Amino acid sequence: MPSGRRHQRMQRPPAGAAEEGRPCPWVLPRPSWATALRLIHLLLLSIGICCLIICGQLWRPKQTQLNPLEVHIAELQLNLTVPRKDPTLRWAAGPTLGRSFTRGPGLERGQLYIHREGIYRLHIQVTLANCSSEYSTMQHRAMVAVGICSPAAHSISLLRLPFGRGCTVASQRLTHLALGDVLCTNLTLPLLPSRNAEETFFGIHWVYP
């Protein structure tokens, strides 16, 4: 009997053998190669998106980088240094011409050239030289017209002001102007506009992007 009991004790499995199949709670599973590749792909994708955002900011058109407080404005006077051979009125600006000036827009052959797209307030006043109060057929048909004359794709009339029985026409309006637009003003021939800066002037004022 003692030898039988010793045999049973020898065949009894050790206490720790029953727990060999259980995973240890403090050991983390090793990631597979597929999981590692997914993480690498996600990282590369994130880096690519960040690069696209940064490049988009750097290559944004220059116009959006303009100072929002920079207002484009111009006030012009007539430039009648040569006789009128066509209906187009030509304008000028500078210290030698009194209160005329340009801040942003340019002058191209006496016409306003737009350097910044946006909504502009346009105003004009034209007084006829040697105008009499008596009604005449020529005066009745006379008209001042303002429009975009270049580029051809943007060509459009903005203002048409008939003199009728008066000697002066004046008006203003809001209009959208694009970068590169050229504004032209026409007066019916053979009438002449007054050179007085208080009677004849033309200007624009940028008010909104």
Image (spheres, grey):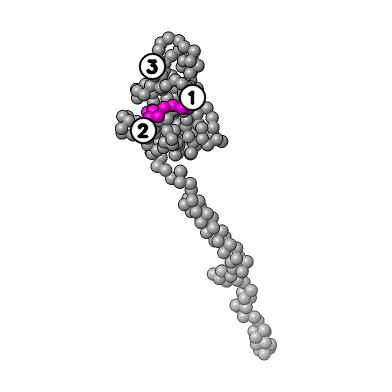
Viewer-nearest of discs 2 and 3: 3
The image quadrant where one finds the N terminus is: bottom right
Q: Looking at the picture, how far across and down is residue 151, in whole percent?
A: 52, 36
Magenta stretch holds residue 142: no
Mark nearer the N terminus (1 vs 2) = 2
Q: Nearer the viewer, residue 4 or 147?
A: 147
Identify the secondary structure beneath mark 3: loop
Pointer 1 residue: 145
Could you tell me if residue 174 is visible in this image? Answer: no
User: What residue is shown at x 31% (from left), y 33% (from top)?
Assistant: 95
Q: CA distance from mark 2 to mark 3?
A: 24 Å
**Which amino acid type corresponds to the residue marked 1 in the rendered image?**
Ala
Pointer 3 residue: 130
Identify the secondary structure beneath mark 2: loop
**Which amino acid type corresponds to the residue marked 2 in the rendered image?**
Ala
- The secondary structure making up most of the magenta span is loop
Q: CA distance from mark 1 to mark 3?
A: 20 Å
Q: Residues within 10 Å of mark 3 (few under 14, many from 20)?
A: few
Pointer 2 residue: 93
Q: Which residue sits furthest bottom?
A: 3
Provide the residue span drawn in magenta. 76-87
**Image quarter of residue 82:** top left
